[in-house]
């Protein structure tokens, strides 16, 4: 085993993306070491099995060790404010990450998609549009396959979901098309303030060939003037823009004056999904995809699991799983999107790890659309305090209890919406596990 303090390159963090970095550097024949602040990182067994020659340090990060390197490839789960990383940065060590390496080695155009919410939905939808247009398409990044595992000279286009954490260590992106879909308060347990979070998101636009702009969300828009831009929004579009138009008592997705598709032809519901469809169309237009292929993909798209997913109707009540609503903005979009489309009221199930967020922005939408709120998890009381003066609030200890309580509160014609506005890690392995347990509990109501 090599001595870790003799390596010019160190992979910091041995999770999913860290192991993809290991595989990439090994394929390149480069010397490197690995460090992780945990005693038993998730991919340690895989590293030791497949790369026994690679030196690895597990446990508290050493500032001396990291400062001796030339380059640190930092996994997105590790904040750059970590003291050992700050010491290395102060010593002049370069900071990079898997997306940065990916961008430097990709031979096909990159579509870079970030935002507080809907990244996975829009990334998947754009990927399906590209495939429908006959392009050999790779989809990944923060969604599914790590970026470096996607590299292949046979790929025609990379459609990448990128988180703010990934963008922090990215300096060479140069996307063919870049978009920040929206901004709402998130990860306030990691960022000093909202401006710091926005600054990380804004890195997606650096040296992009074309940018797609949400004209309804000023905070998400590029702070620097862009040579080529196309916008989307829920208002009527001007020439060269995507938006919504009313015609013959129907609402249409539109491009300028051109009516493209009635929104009731989409399998996904809610104004937030209309915005997602318009964003995908704007990205596809920037990639010069045929409109027919894009519209075909839109009509076929049934949405993703755990993202405002309709589960079933039980005794006249519809049940929706939006476990992926892990921040306030995502929950707000779901409440407003579903609330505006349903004659009945919503019973909202919320709570979990709030990541330091302010829940007060939910109050107006809950007042307008909700009959009651059921809260659980670490920050249940903070959610309850934010909405207690507007609708009845019921506190429960488990998701199964939440389903039972919501079923009792709902009336025929209502909908129950799991949109926690919080991360899941206080009670569950991940948001998928939370959503699956919710679906199982709903199934047992039958």
Image (tube, grey):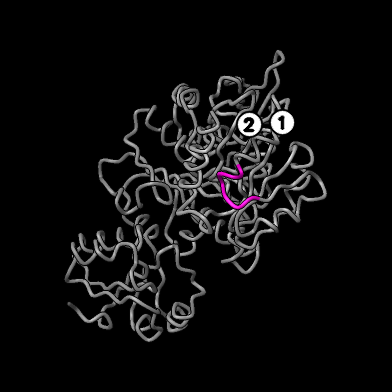
Q: Which residue is mark 1?
A: 340
The residue shown at (70%, 58%) is 382
Quarter of the image where one finds residue 71? bottom left
Q: Is residue 229 left or right of residue 8?
A: right
Q: Secondary structure at mark 2?
A: loop
Q: Earlier in the sequence, mark 2 or mark 1?
A: 2
The residue shown at (67%, 33%) is 234
Residue 322 position (above or below residue 78): above
Q: Is residue 374 left or right of residue 212?
A: right
Residue 192 visible somewhere in the drawing: yes
In the picture, the disc for residue 128 is none
Q: Secondary structure at mark 1?
A: helix
Quarter of the image where one finds residue 347? top right
Q: Residues within 10 Å of mark 2 (few under 14, many from 20)?
A: many
Residue 361 position (above or below residue 126): below
Residue 407 in picture, x, y percent from top left: 64, 35
Q: Which residue is mark 2?
A: 270
State if disc 1 and disc 2 touch (CB < 8 Å).
Answer: yes
Q: Considering the image in quadrants, where does the N terminus appear? A: bottom left
Residue 423 in picture, x, y percent from top left: 55, 54
Quarter of the image where one finds residue 334? top right
The residue shown at (72%, 53%) is 384
Distance (Cα) linking label 2 and label 1: 8 Å
Residue 220 visible somewhere in the drawing: no
Asked whether 243 or 388 is in front, the reply is 388
Residue 107 position (above or below residue 126): below
The region drawn magenta spans 396-402
């Amino acid at each position: 085993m090599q001595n870790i303090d003799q390596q010019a390159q160190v992979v910091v963090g041995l999770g999913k993306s860290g192991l993809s970095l290991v595989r990439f550097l090994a394929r390149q024949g480069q010397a490197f070491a690995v460090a992780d602040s945990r005693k038993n990182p998730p991919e340690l067994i895989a590293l030791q099995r497949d790369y026994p020659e690679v030196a690895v340090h597990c446990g508290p990060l050493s500032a001396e060790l990291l400062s001796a390197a030339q380059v640190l490839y930092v996994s997105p789960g590790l904040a750059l404010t970590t003291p050992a990383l700050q010491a290395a940065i102060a010593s002049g060590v370069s900071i990079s990450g898997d997306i940065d390496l990916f961008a430097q080695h990709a031979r096909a155009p990159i579509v870079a998609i970030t935002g507080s919410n809907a990244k996975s939905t829009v990334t998947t939808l754009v990927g399906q549009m590209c495939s429908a247009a006959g392009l050999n398409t790779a989809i990944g990044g923060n969604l599914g396959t790590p970026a470096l595992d996607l590299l292949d000279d046979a790929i025609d286009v990379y459609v990448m979901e990128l988180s703010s954490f990934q963008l922090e260590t990215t300096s060479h992106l140069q996307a063919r098309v870049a978009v920040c879909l929206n901004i709402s308060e998130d990860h306030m347990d990691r960022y000093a303030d909202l401006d710091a979070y926005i600054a990380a998101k804004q890195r997606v636009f650096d040296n992009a060939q074309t940018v797609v702009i949400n004209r309804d969300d000023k905070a998400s828009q590029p702070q620097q003037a862009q040579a080529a831009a196309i916008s989307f929004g829920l208002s009527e579009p001007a020439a060269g823009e995507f938006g919504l138009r009313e015609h013959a008592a129907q609402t249409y997705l539109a491009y300028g004056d051109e009516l493209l598709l009635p929104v009731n032809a989409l399998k996904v519901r809610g104004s937030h999904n209309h915005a997602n469809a318009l964003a995908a169309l704007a990205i596809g237009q920037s990639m010069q995809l045929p409109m027919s292929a894009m519209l075909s993909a839109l009509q076929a798209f049934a949405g993703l699991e755990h993202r405002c997913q309709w589960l079933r109707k039980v005794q006249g009540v519809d049940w929706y799983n939006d476990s992926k609503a892990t921040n306030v903005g995502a929950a707000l979009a779901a409440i407003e999107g579903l609330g505006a489309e349903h004659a009945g009221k919503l019973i909202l199930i919320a709570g979990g790890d709030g990541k330091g967020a302010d829940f007060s922005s939910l109050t107006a939408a809950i007042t307008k659309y909700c009959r009651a709120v059921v809260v659980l998890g670490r920050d249940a009381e903070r959610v309850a305090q934010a909405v207690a003066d507007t609708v009845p609030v019921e506190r429960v200890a488990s998701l199964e209890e939440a389903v039972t309580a919501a079923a009792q509160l709902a009336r025929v014609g209502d909908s129950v919406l799991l949109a926690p506005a919080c991360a899941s890690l206080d009670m569950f392995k991940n948001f998928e596990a939370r959503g699956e347990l919710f679906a199982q509990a709903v199934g047992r109501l039958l």
